[in-house]
Amino acid sequence: MRNFVVWFDIPVRDLDRSVKFYAEVIATDLAVVEGAPGRQANFPFAPGIASGSLRENKEHKPGATGTMVYLDGGDDLSVPLARVEAAGGTVIKGKTAIGPNGFMAIFKDCDGNTVALHSRN
């Protein structure tokens, strides 16, 4: 079965601030790319696995409504969720069981985007 999602962009106002926020919350490095329309920082990716970026440009504005992206919360999303507020975000919904699909949580990032985390445990 193929992935239906192949790429996503999370709009941001200040790329450097947002890179710091996401790097702290999900404990990973993002690669800043110059030269595209606007600036962007890519989440790690490998061929055949969906990924995305933080994108700073004039056409897209951050917001709390619209499509919600679920990021990989690792083995237990409680770990990255515990870092959200110290990084400048707000937890909206704590770790919540979603039956056989594991757990999810929702937070607002430093730009006001609503983003979710998912983990099996």
Image (cartoon, rainbow, N blue to C red):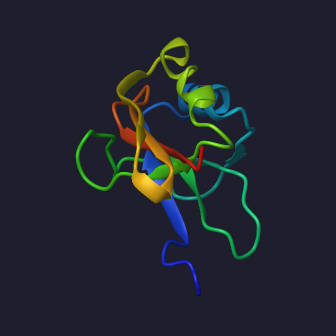
With respect to residue 118, does 113 lie above or below? above
Q: Is residue 37 left or right of residue 27?
A: left
**Which residue shows up at 45% across the image and 48% down it?**
10
- Of 102 and 69, which appears nearest the observer? 102
Pick the front one: 118 or 65: 118
Residue 92 in the image: state x and y as whole percent. 32, 28
Query: Which residue is at a point 43% across and 25% down the rendered structure image?
Result: 110
For residue 38, say whether it is visible.
no
Relative placement, left or right, of 43 versus 15 is: right
- Report the quarter where the N terminus lies: bottom right
Q: Is residue 29 left or right of residue 55?
A: right
From this view, report whether residue 36 is shown above or below residue 18.
below
Q: Residue furthest bottom?
A: 1
Pick out the residue farthest to the front. Answer: 100
Residue 101 percent location from the top left of the image: 48, 58
Residue 48 seen from this side: yes
> In front: 116, or 32?
116
Residue, x 54% and y 31% (percent of image)? 18
| Quarter of the figure with the C terminus | top right
The quarter holding residue 109 reads top left
**Lateral position of residue 25 relative to residue 66, left or right:** right
